[in-house]
Amino acid sequence: MNMKKIILGCLMGAVLLCGCAKKKVQPEWMKSEGRFNVTSGAQTKTPQAKTEQAQATEETAEDDFVKEAKLCELAQKYGFKVGACISYNQVNQKYYIDMLTGDFNTTTATNEFKAYSLLNQAKSIAEGLPVMNYTQADRIAKLAKENGIGIRGHVLVWDAYMSEWFFREGFKSDGLPVSKEVMQERLEYYIDQVITHFETEFPGVVYCWDVVNEAVADSADEWVEGNEFHLRRTRGGSINLFNAIMGADYVKFAFQCARKTVNRVNPDIKLFYNDYNTFYQDKRDAIVKLIKYLNNEEKLCDGLGMQGYIGGYGQQAGCMNSNDLALIKTAIKMYSDLGLEVQLTEVAVRNYEKEQIEKHARFYGELFCTVISACQEGANFTGFTIWGITDNPNMPKNDYSYKMNGPYCGLFDQYYKPKNAYKEVYKALE
């Protein structure tokens, strides 16, 4: 360490001591200032950005942290991308886009690439085939292309919130359920059209697709009885219509359709299975069985997406548990040993208490160290995408995102200023 750094370190300590007496900027975010809630989709008025941003910039000058590279650039030496999610409503939010382009080389649309967002019922009825409206998804893809950012296509087949009319005769809400054969024809057409559209309009931008999402259930009362990989039969009491109409092989059928299309349009596109709770033993082992089933005769699945919601659901208890880090590393290596790429795809390091922000920062750094360690030990880990990217201190407890992410989950605060969590991640990657 040279004399300049020693002097800077001493000055930093003095500044921090003095800074304790200063009044910090009072946090305002999504619900109060209109910034988009990336998980629940809530949106209100335009944010008061100028004054807040100036204040955040002044605070940043209070320490000696110097950013010399993007997070994604630092991660390149370990072989993985780093990203954050985006929604259509954030495309024109300058400070969010500055944050996205300033550190990340991959992004995932929170809802706009999903079937229930793309499908157009009226036009499907008129034409007798699935018809999609790509307007919002294309705007995200255009932004990504213009900024050299890749996209994880999320997701082709997901039972949750799926438009029920897609499974009915004539695409009518009151139509009778279609046969398995008709449903297979519809799904194959849909998958082919969607993958082809994005590769044709934005070549090379969508570098992978989550083909199927959350098909493995968590408990015996929700999975198909006797199914070795715990195929989801219901979700919160709602029937999985893909399974109900197409049967237990719908997951494999979807991958076969996707494989056929990517082989035609771009064989470099990777196909993923994506799920939550992927590092807990029972579900992890069921997913391993599913992957072996999918890839038994030919390699249909290239990768495993571990969503990465880490910590207590809606409560501080269980958050920042070091045992989770060990479980995550074990799961990464197990999935990698199956010949798969492994990615953390929807990370939210949950924290519900402002007083735990520094502990949260250290844990975030440890999480990245865990991933780096897995890479150094030979795991084929290729992506780390964060969904709980920004704090939201004013989020009400009954908000969906409160439970999913926690109000103090971010690498950035509510003004897009890097928190100490960001700096711990930077140091881990550096």
Image: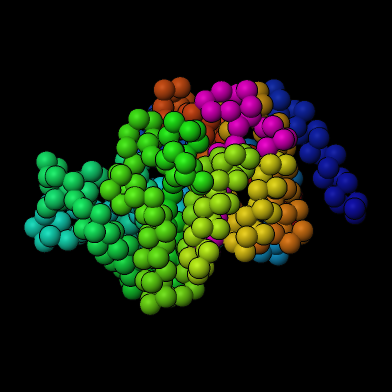
Along the line of sight, the residue nearer the viewer: 83 or 32: 83
Residue at image position (42%, 69%) is: 259
Along the line of sight, the residue nearer the viewer: 291 or 154: 291
Residue 369 seen by the camera: yes
The x and y percentages for residue 423 are: 69, 45
Would you say residue 306 sits in the magenta stretch?
yes
Principal SS element in the magenta part?
loop
Image quadrant assignment for residue 214:
top left
The x and y percentages for residue 12 are: 79, 39
Above or below 18: residue 145? below
State the extent of the magenta-drawn residues as a range.
301-324
Would you say residue 405 sits in the magenta stretch?
no
Is residue 118 rendered to the left or right of residue 354? Answer: left
Residue at image position (32%, 62%) is: 191
The x and y percentages for residue 18 are: 75, 28
Residue at image position (43%, 34%) is: 222
Above or below 344: residue 382? below
Residue 349 seen by the camera: no
In the rendered image, the residue lying farthest to the left is 126
Chosen colour scheme: rainbow
Q: How many marks?
A: 0
Residue at image position (21%, 58%) is: 182
Image quadrant assignment for residue 347:
top right
Of the 4 image quadrants, the one containing the C terminus is bottom right
